[in-house]
Image (cartoon, helix red, strand yellow):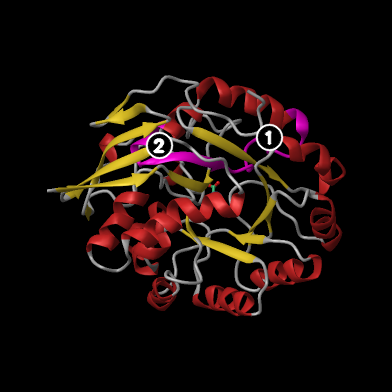
Amino acid sequence: MSQITLPGLIDVHTHLRVPGGEHKEDFYTGTAAALAGGITMILGMPNTSPPLTTPEVMQAVLARAQKDVLCDVGLFAGASPDYIAQLVQLAPFAAALKIYLNDTFGPLRVEDVPTLRACFQNWPADKLIAMHAEKQSVAVGIGLAAVYGRAVHFCHISRREEIELIADAKMHGLPVTCEVTPHHLFMNEADYRRMGALADMRPVLGTPDDVAALWEHLTETIDCIATDHAPHTLAEKQSPKPPPGVAGLETSLPLMITAVAQNRLTLDRLIQLMCDNPRRIYNLPPQPETWVEVEMTPTTIRSETMFSKCGWTPFHGWEVAGRISRVTLRGQVVYEAGKILAAAGNGRVLGMSD
Ligand code: NCD
Ligand code: ZN
């Protein structure tokens, strides 16, 4: 049995559900799930209730985070036509701006050009703009990156047509980057037909050809692996109107390390995709003396041992090639042998002066 040591991983797409969705996840359970998954820094999404669209909400949520987090956390501000005038005041508290061009869980949506222009003109140049853009909306994002000459990061790209368009944009030197999720790499629409709501998320799972395109582009066009950890309770998923989204923090590295064991990607590339590129793209602070030890031993993913409050994963029962044995954050062992050793508030919150 061999052991691998990796730098602390960074997930730039997590839903921590505070405020308003604490029955699905909270800052403590979400960051516990991150550590158990070998992830030491996460960026939380703004589609909470209320959403992270005003400085007041943002400040209050950051203060709650500082009390509870076990790993380092930054938060996205959400773009909304209703609060667009306050965008500049919101920026100091946020790690980046998220614009939702397409439908998903929660009410945050931007469907008008004046709001898009205001975002690109007023959001500070040193902070990134990330987009939920599917199909032709990716072309909208690329167009805005070209017009305003500023970087755009595309969240959870899932289709061949999207990744090929982004490859074309990069070939033309446009400042665009993108992430893909493990679920879009390891599952396809047949899993949705088999599992229904438990394999329903936005973007929906792709065709086998979409999945093949993502693997083809993993060594070049794709910049990051991001989990889109989107926990919902089993009861919600089994209700007549199940919300889209699945957990991902605890299964991302086990799945990706399995791809390394199967020679589908190199360990160096995994580190670029899950640590170096996320840090560079989002301009995130370094985490000195921070690393993750992985035991390369066949392991079965199990819902029962999850730290995420939702308590289930669509990968339950999957055999993976390794398990996270120990996580060290700033010289302190924070996770070992299935146990959280960090104390609440141990993590740093980006955007809080400390
Ligand atoms: C996310 C959620 O539940 O917040 N759901 C999802 O299916 N991905 C929203 C999102 O990331 O689009
Ligand atoms: Zn998401």
Residue at 38%, 67% (x, y): give it: 188
Residue located beneath label 1 in the image? 50
Q: Is residue 306 magenta?
A: no
Disc 2: CA contacts within 10 A as few (<14), some (14-19) or many (>=20): some
Residue 227 visible in the picture: no
Q: Eyeballing the image, is 231 above or below 110? A: above
**Depth order, front residue of 51/30:** 30
* Numbered disc in front, either 2 or 1: 2
Q: Is residue 118 left or right of residue 33?
A: right
Please, what secondary structure does the residue beneath circle 1 have? loop
In three-dimensional space, the C-alpha distance between marks 2 and 1, rounded to whole angstroms, equals: 34 Å
Quadrant of residue 101 in the image? bottom right
Residue at left offset 75%, top offset 56%: 110
- The residue located at (57%, 40%) in the rendering is 285
- Read off the residue under disc 2: 290
Residue 123 x, y percent position in the rendering = 79, 49
Mark 2: which secondary structure?
loop
**Marking on residue 338:** none
Nearest the viewer among 215 and 107 is 215
- The amino acid at mark 1 is Pro
Would you call the spot at circle 1 few (<14 residues within 10 Å), some (14-19), or many (20 or more)?
some
242 up-or-down from 189: above or below: above
Closer to the camera, 174 or 299? 174
Q: Which residue occupies the extreme left position in the image?
A: 1
Q: Earlier in the sequence, mark 2 or mark 1?
A: 1
User: Looking at the picture, does residue 222 appear above or below residue 327?
Assistant: below
Q: Pointers 2 and 1 in contact (CB under 8 A)?
A: no
List x then y, in percent, for residue 61.
64, 28
Of the pair 78 and 200, the residue shown nearer to us: 78
Numbered range of the magenta stretch: 32-56
Q: Is residue 166 left or right of residue 120?
A: left
Amino acid on which the number 2 mark rests in the picture: Thr
